[in-house]
Image (tube, rainbow, N blue to C red):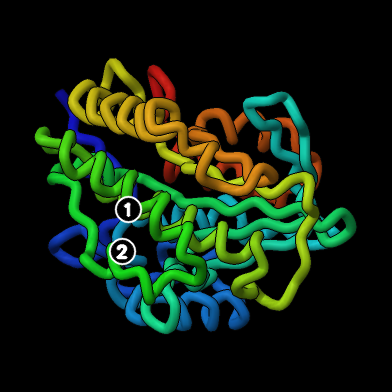
Amino acid sequence: MEKLIDKIKERVDKSDVKANGYFYDFRKNVFTGKMDETYISMFLKGDGSELVSKACAPHSSSMLGYNFFHWINKEHKLTITFNDKKEITYDEVLFEVKIPVLNGKKKANMDIVLRNNKTGEWLFIESKFTEYLNRGKFKMSDSYRNESLYFKKDYRDKWTRIIDSISGSSKETGYWNGIKQGICHLIGLTNWLDKCVKIKGKEYNNEDVRFINLVFEPDEERFKNEYDKFTDYKKLYYDFYEQLRIEKLIPSNLKMEFMTYKQLWKCFENCKELPEGLMGFLSDRYMDFAFKDK
């Protein structure tokens, strides 16, 4: 069977990459070869070395997300259709947004944040490309059992039960790091919605704040091994949300779902405001590996 990461590396210009298949410069990994200084600053304020390390990988999830969303602004909007059939239009994008999770200690990096400045609706996105190929057991820092680090005591009581429940039942290896990140993000968003912390100093629409795990789904026939691990992670994510009844732990106005880049692609096909050449770039660099016979 073909290997997804190998095929992705094969697609790029060999003169732009090192022997390991990584780009010499992250700019070769982005649409038009340029990144606005505003966005460079956002990435540098994230985990620091993103642009000189991970962003140079052709299979970088942060650059996947950047290439899909960087063009959104007041003049160029994107409308996304969600699983509940609601359509929301966004006119601002932020990258690597830090959300306080534990008091004075831990923050979670949200890969992409979209906002509608007129309605106050927010969309928080955790982008995944091939991360689910990594296997491991569920682990959470002991900090998440320390009552004094939570903004409210009842947050600690609720999430400790979930963490202990997963720790006791997750004997098999899988992409548990995705679940761990989800927990951190949900605690952080709960802090924000309950007005314990601020994000960029902006208000939100009480009726519609969304958090999606946006995952790249490879073609099943060409990349069987990767597709199987994708479906394993999807099941793991749904089990986490549904069996543990996560909706009971988070604010009622926070909606959570699993979405694929294939689903998102349909929204792009319906969008009339995309930069010239972007669809071709995204198709060649990414979506050709998501569809059959490409």
What x and y, as percent, mark residue 41?
A: 54, 83
Question: Where's the N terminus, which quadrant?
Answer: top left
What x and y, as percent, mark residue 208?
A: 74, 45
| 102 lies left or right of 254 | left
Reply above or below: 91 against 165: below
Disc 2 + disc 1, Cβ < 8 Å: yes
| 75 lies left or right of 84 | right
Gap between marks 2 and 1, in whole Å? 7 Å
Instruction: Tell which of 39 and 242 is nearer to you.
Output: 242
What x and y, as percent, mark residue 32?
A: 56, 63
Please give the residue where the numbered disc 2 appears in the rendered image: 144
Please give the residue where the numbered disc 1 appears in the rendered image: 160
User: Hey, what amino acid is under mark 2?
Assistant: Tyr
- Residue at image x 37%, y 80%? 105
- Residue at image x 41%, y 37%? 216
Question: Where's the C terminus, which quadrant?
Answer: top left
Crowd class of label 2 (few under 14; some 14 to 19; many from 20; radius 10 Å): some
Label disc, if present, on residue 81 of the rendered structure: none
Residue 16 visible? The answer is: no
| 56 lies left or right of 72 | left
Reply above or below: 199 against 241: below
User: Hey, what amino acid is under mark 1?
Assistant: Thr
Q: What element carries label 1?
A: helix
